[in-house]
Amino acid sequence: MSSDTSATSLDSGEQIPAWQTVKLGMAISPELKQGLAGTVALAVLATLGRIVVPVAVQQTLDRGLTAPGGPDVPFTVQMALLAAVAVVVTGGASYLMTSRLFRTAETGLASLRVKAFRHVHDLPLLTQSTERRGALVARVTSDVDQVSQFLIFGGVIAIVSIGQITVATVVMLVYSWQLTLVVWLCFAPLFLSLRFFQQRLSAAYGVVRQQVGTLLAAVAEPVVGAAVVKAYAVEDRTQRRIDEAIDRHRAASIRAQGLTAFSFSLGGVSAGLANAGVLIVGVWAGLAGDVSIGVVLAFAFLVTLFVGPVQMGTQVLTDAQNAVAGWRRVIGILQTPADVTDPGEAGTPLPERPVDITFDHVGFAYPGGPPVLHDVHLEVRAGTRLAVVGETGSGKSTLAKLLTRLMDPSRGRVLLDGIDLREVPFASLRRRVVLVPQEGFLFDDDLAANLRYGRLDATDADLAAAAAELDLSDWLAGLPRGLRTRVGQRGESLSAGERQLVALVRAQLADPDLLVLDEATSAVDPELEMRIGRALERLMSGRTSVTIAHRLTTAENADEVLVVDRGEVVQRGSHAALVAEGGAYGRLHASWVAQQGRGPAAD
Amino acid sequence: MSGPRTRAGGTSTMRDGFHVLGVAIRREPWVFTWSTLGSVLFGALTVADAWVLGWATERFVLPAFRTGELDPGIALAVLALFLGVALLRAVGIVARRLGAGIMQYRMQAHYRRAVTRKYLELPLEWHQRHPTGQLLSNANADVEAAWAPIAPLPMAIGTVAMMVIAIAQMLLTDLVMALAGLVVFPLVLVANVVFQRIQSPLMTRAQALRAELSEIAHESFDGAMVVKTLGREAEETDRFAHKAAELRDVAVRAGRVRAAFDPVLEALPNLAVLVVLALGVQRVLDGDAVAGDVVTIAYLLTIVAFPIRSLGWLLGEFPRSVVGYDRVTSVIAETGQMTYGDATLAGHAPGRAASLALEEVGYAYPGSEPLLRGVSFEVPAGRSVALVGPTAAGKSTLTALLVRAVDPDTGRVLVDGTDLRTLAHGDLARHVALVSQSTFLFDDTVRGNVALDEDLDDEEVWAALRAAQAEEFVRALPDGLEARLGERGTTLSGGQRQRLALARALVRRPRLMILDDATSAVDPEVEGRILAALRDAAGPGADPPTVLTVAYRKATIALADEVVHLAEGRVVDRGTHAELLARSPAYARLVNAYEDEGMEP
């Protein structure tokens, strides 16, 4: 896991200590604390229920069965009835406790999930790098599930286990301190070794998780990479890699399972030892007159109360550790500051008219990376159609992202109509300023729902009208089910070019004052691109627009061209003036013309 | 299709569930045997524990209290018995749990292998018919679900053994008390089955909701750019919150069911113990039983009642297991793998370009209109041909036919005059390379991604990277050729990925190279260098390969000796670029779009 390639760092939460994690987690999800005292009280009551039967057995044996003067039937029956009532009451307490615990934990964690999800959208990460989205998804899904599993199951088991051992010990102490000591001496080594086993188990399950990751990647190869595997006939190699991943996963899982089995089995050994110890020491103490026969036998039942908690101990500790780790990762998201924050009500909304653009000595670098833009200073008058050109990696897209406030500059300011973008409320900014990115992402729904991302209240007629304005009516008519066409996951039922068309219609619907197009028509064929280009001219008229493109036709049609090279604006002017000037633009133009097969002489 | 069969009802699920277990037992009989033996040992010794307690009460505790003397011999025997039973039982636990684990993970491994082998065998056309997510879940979640019941299986069998022994022992100890106590076993079993019946659908629903929630998060994060640029964060959060609330409600409902059943399952044996006590005192009074009998039966009840749950766990896993197994086996049962002949292209000298011919090739995606109709053209050895046509004309499908990723419905594809269908498996790949629009990178190093199964030295890999204009950025990676790529490694840009894919093709020195818009994500300038390098990449003394390239850019087209113009699934014209420009208005419109727009001369 090298983090040096990621654009910005996400707080992994790894440095938060365990108890701090729990405290923070509780603070973030206050629902978790609601009724906690009641739940704990119920848990104690429920635990008492587990002691009732051993106590009843003891009482019956001592005072019923072996009572001086023969067995006492009425006493025993009374005892049994009393115990039965207690069993039922504590059963009720157990029901209330568990259902309360489920409700609080699930409610608290559902809201934690939603908070984290929202925060991820507020982070610049997603728009800066496409990597590790899977990891982010895990943070709002499986990591939260892990916490909830632990809070509910681990939590119940932990509360009940600790309660059970405590209550059993108290009862034992009431009966006989000597025998209590015997029991504790027999179980002490096991309690002490819990941590030892838990560490080994954690390590073993860590390996399993890692192998699951490798396995998933390997299994995905013949599915996601089917075309490549077949084209290169590398089935054997692929199968070898899969088999290797499968074998490693199996071996790691079995190893972890073996360790679990071994640590689990030890509880019974201690119980056996304790039972023998209790009987022998009990009899010996009984002869001295310290304990009764019923007490000795009651201990045999009380000892079983220790076995469960000890057997589950390592498991609970491991789950706890995983849950805390998961919780940490979710909290890590919430603690990663959203660098780009919404000023909200306090901000200044943009006026509803075409806007001026000012870059005031803007510099930008990704955290820990080299500068991408150096001291860009420029002003663009309202209503200008500006084209930005430059080689891959020159900083063009960074300009677009700064202009739409997907990121804030490291130095300097970006202003629209003299207002610093950082002071514009998102509600106003996102309505007035629209970026059409290169990848027209679609959601797995029908076309209408996807177009409506541009304007939520648009009617079908509005959608059709927007498409018509972009000269796309015949495309829409050519789709099998028109606006009701399902686009498939990530829009995969449409071609890359068609996805770009959807993005353009969205922008048309959004009706912004500043339109930023970042290679928005790169995937359609030239003829269609030119047709859209003409439509875009109409879309841009009366607005300020910034268009980024490698195809220089766009630059030819723009009012002004900006040439970016290695993070600096190196040239600015009309297409004709820049061609005459030569320089970087001259080179780009010559290469473009050569690509078009016209030869530089044609110019 | 791999959808689950519909099932009549509970009994058939039960029968099918046992059938699935039968498959596992037949496949891993030895592991199953020793884990079951371990479980039976555990069960027997759990019962023995109660017997030891009863024995110790009668022979050791009561006599000692009666006589006031402690017999050290018997004390030692008590110690040895308890400890011996406990140790043997620990061995039983380890054998049972480890055995179950080994069996479960082995079965998972067997079926994962079988499914992925099938994926590799089945043709691309089959892959295209099945959603990626479904195929991945067949190999992962479904395999796991199918063999999930193995985990509680030995425990359940051991429990049955333990119940039989316990019941026998109780009956032998005292018939009346035993019968009273025994009512509890069927009650616990019934309660368990009822619990599983109510709980299973809830758990399945929760699982499905978890998957949906994860899908929403995936989609939403993937579309973050759109969400953010159009300011739709609140709507997206609502969508996620809605699903999260649904999941919470199901989880809470499942929790309530569990909360209700757990105390019942726990109380039943406790109540039975109390009944036994009340009865026992009467029996002892009447002289029909001794105190030790009461203790033994009470103890047996408490220890046996809990494991009965494992039967519930086993039965509870059945519905998911049966569905998973059905899905997995329906993939394994799929047929229609491509058949291969035994012809080879080896007779043709390496370093000599290959010829390509299509004869009346037609192709339709299943259930769709034909995409390609009667396509015929030839590319003589050493020539380069550009395939030009509007979006969705069938160009990419055509390239898939040329590397036999799919077979044509009609007509033939020939390389060096040999029908691709008669070639031996793997032979075509030694001579023909396709670089497609989208690039798949393996979860492997740069070297592994370029060399694949070829054994190449560094210099050969670097040479290919150089030709593909990828050398510079690979050198800049921290580990160079050994840098890991893919999901968990370095992320490359679209243009970098395309260049690696080109290197992957070039390193094999193909005699026919097919480029499907393979340089769309690189700058025109870099593209020019790549295309120039392609001609020199064949190596010293060898001919440049035959090249078929799908392109829009005129520079790319201009490099080709000839152009095949494809529209609506047919070859509409063929000739040099100049000829086509002169005689085909549609072609001219397509390739001249930029100039027509008015690059003023």
Image (tube, coloured by chain):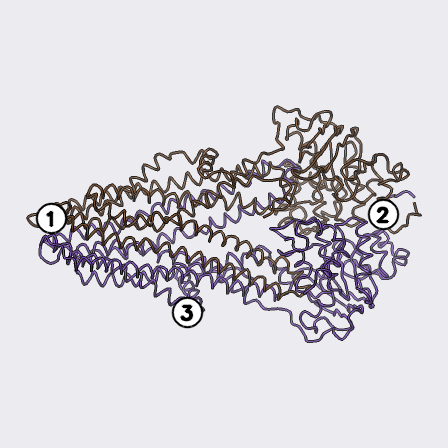
* Residue B524 percent coordinates (x, y): 81, 49
User: Mark 2 belongs to which amino acid?
Assistant: Ser
What is chain A's hue in the picture? brown
The residue to which callout 2 is attached is A591
- Asked whether the viewer can see residue A508, the reply is no
Q: Secondary structure at mark 3?
A: helix
* Residue A134 percent coordinates (x, y): 58, 47
The residue to which callout 1 is attached is A73
Q: Residues within 10 Å of mark 2 (few under 14, many from 20)?
A: some
Residue for point 30% across, 39% down: A44
Q: CA distance from mark 3 to mark 2?
A: 71 Å
Lateral position of residue B286 relative to residue A188, left or right: left
* Residue B373 percent coordinates (x, y): 75, 64
The residue to which callout 3 is attached is B29
Lateral position of residue B51 relative to residue A364, left or right: left
Quadrant for the N terminus of chain B in the image: bottom right
Lateral position of residue A472 relative to residue B329, left or right: right
